Amino acid sequence: MDKARPKNLDLLSIKFPMAAIMSVGHRAAGILLFLLLPYFLYLLQLSLTNETGFALAKAELQGPWVKLTGLVLIWALAHHFIAGIRYFFLDLDIGIEKHMAQKSAIMVMVSGFLIFVISFLLLL
């Protein structure tokens, strides 16, 4: 029974539902939090040691790459937190219907993006 099955290797042609995209974002946000948090904890520890450490940490935080990294960390925290609340409600069987699950996934994506934009405007 060796039937030739059609294979679609072009992943960009597949239309994923918003809930799947949001789920991937949730996982990516968790990975980013895991990878970026030690650096910012180091900066916090450095700033709390003495006045010189505070000045060094402050100078480090003024760099454009650190600001961009901070914005990414803010997005990751917001998206991961809001998606976690969504998953909590789904575990309680609230919003489990397909149309409600799609709407809540869109709300997670939009609210995470809005928090990112507001943070960007505040950091200018």
Image (cartoon, rainbow, N blue to C red):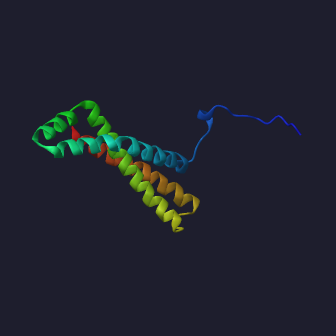
6 sits left or right of 113 in the view = right
The image quarter containing residue 82 is bottom left
Q: Is residue 122 visible?
A: no
Q: Position of residue 42 (x, y in %)?
A: 27, 42
Quarter of the image with the N terminus in it: top right
The image quarter containing residue 117 is top left
71 sits left or right of 21 in the view = left
Residue at 25% from the left image edge and 31% from the top image edge: 64
Q: Position of residue 24 (x, y in %)?
A: 51, 45
Quarter of the image with the C terminus in it: top left
Q: Is residue 59 visible?
A: yes
Q: Position of residue 119 (x, y in %)?
A: 27, 44
Residue at 19% from the left image edge and 38% from the top image edge: 57
In the rendered image, the residue lying farthest to the front is 49
Query: In the picture shown, does residue 96 fall above or below 44?
Result: below
Residue at 10% from the left image edge and 41% from the top image edge: 51
Residue closest to the eye, 76 or 104:
76
Query: In the picture shown, does residue 124 fall above or below 88?
Result: above
15 sits left or right of 124 in the view = right
Query: In the picture shown, does residue 91 fall above or below 119?
Result: below
The image quarter containing residue 46 is top left
Give the total number of marks visible in the rendering. Answer: 0
Residue closest to the eye, 93 or 104:
93
In the rendered image, the residue lying farthest to the right is 1
Q: Position of residue 35 (x, y in %)?
A: 39, 41
